[in-house]
Amino acid sequence: MNVFNRLLIIVLDAIMLIAIVLILLVTFGFARPDQLLPSLGLAPFLTPFVGLTGSNFTWTVGVLIGLFILGLILLSLEVRVPPAPSPVLLKKDALGRLTVSRDAASQLIDRAASQVEGVMGVHSRVKETDKGFRIHTRISVNPTTNVAQVTEEVREAIKAAVEQQLGRTAQEVEVRAQLTPLPGKRLGHEPA
Amino acid sequence: MMDQQKTAVADIAVARAAAAAVTSLSGVADLSPGQAAEVATYGPGETVRGVAVHRVDNAFAVDVHVIARYAPATNLQALANRVRRAVTGAVEHLGAGRIQRIDVTIDDLRGEEG
């Protein structure tokens, strides 16, 4: 989700939470409608909640508390910063750990794959297992090339890059080829 | 007397020496301030980003984050080993004391295109 959408949801959610608090204050009789933010002219909207009794009171309070909890959950999900993906391990010994960020490992693999003739775009994801790396790569290929051959060459190029440039084993390399361009800026050859 | 001199070397001096040694390596484009949290050592009026120096059991633990210079033959594990040796050499040259751990992370790659 882009930043604008996220900000919009946060602002709307905050407004909803404030409105719920105001309505609850009026419903429970802690404040009169004309006392709450009089400059905004909210009294006409708050007045119907004054003096509720019986099932009307119960339903109103129940729904408002439910919405308030949902709003809080939504707000906490939107404002939290997603954790950075953990780096992948190259080597671990008595003197410490040598690691490479997942993004840098993906970049390295993308660059190796993009060197294959006929590859127009590359995007890789790296997963780490006990036995080595599992790599999932999507490539867009030039329609005039032999897709099966390009895919195999990319697989070999990725295996070689993982072993020679990262010093690890490629346990699994999955390459998916497509003729349509990949979204976003990707490494590769422009079609002639 | 010698031990007192060793422990007197400040963390920021160790970080500064390590940073200089690491950035002088041919495969290192720059130090990286870290991705998940800031990696830095703070001293009076000075911050060394990309190198975090801690003391563990009267020894140094150094965390180094770098941006590697990409070339088709780049071996990142070999580069990380060179970074580690450079840090070891710098700390030994300072006479700062024992190193317990050096963690090296390559955060990013920088190619010829920048």
Image (spheres, rainbow, N blue to C red):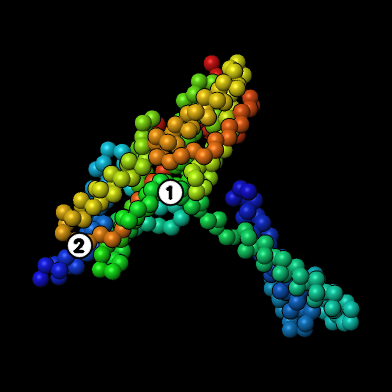
Q: Residue at x 46, y 39 (%)?
A: A169
Q: Is residue A37 above or below residue B100?
A: below
Residue B62, by quadrant, is bottom left
Q: Is residue B57 above or below residue B85?
A: below
- Tell me the residue that label 2 is attached to: B97
Q: Residues within 10 Å of mark 1 (few under 14, many from 20)?
A: some
Q: Are marks 2 and 1 on the same chain?
A: no
Task: Give the percent coordinates (x, y) of residue A23.
Answer: 76, 74
| Label 2 element class | loop
Foreground: A66 or A179?
A179
The residue carrying pointer 2 sits among few (fewer than 14), some (14 to 19) or many (20 or more) residues within 10 Å by Cα, namely some
Chain of the residue where label 2 is placed in the rendered structure: B
Q: Is residue A58 visible?
A: yes
For the C terminus of chain B, give its image quadrant: top left
**Which residue occupies 58% across, 24% down?**
A141
- Residue A189, given in percent of the width and then of the height, sits at 51, 23
Residue B77 in the image: x percent, y percent? 36, 42
Kind of residue at badge 1: Leu
- At 59% from the left and 60% from the top, the residue drawn is A79
Numbered disc in front, either 2 or 1: 1
Residue A89 numbered mark, or none? 1
Q: Amino acid at mark 2?
A: Gly
| In this picture, residue B80 sits left or right of residue A28 | left
Q: In front: A13, or A107?
A: A107
Any part of residue A41 in sight:
no
Res B44 label: none
In the picture, measured across the screen, residue A97 lies left or right of residue A16, that is left
Spot the residue most to the right: A55
Q: Position of residue A1 (x, y in %)?
A: 63, 48
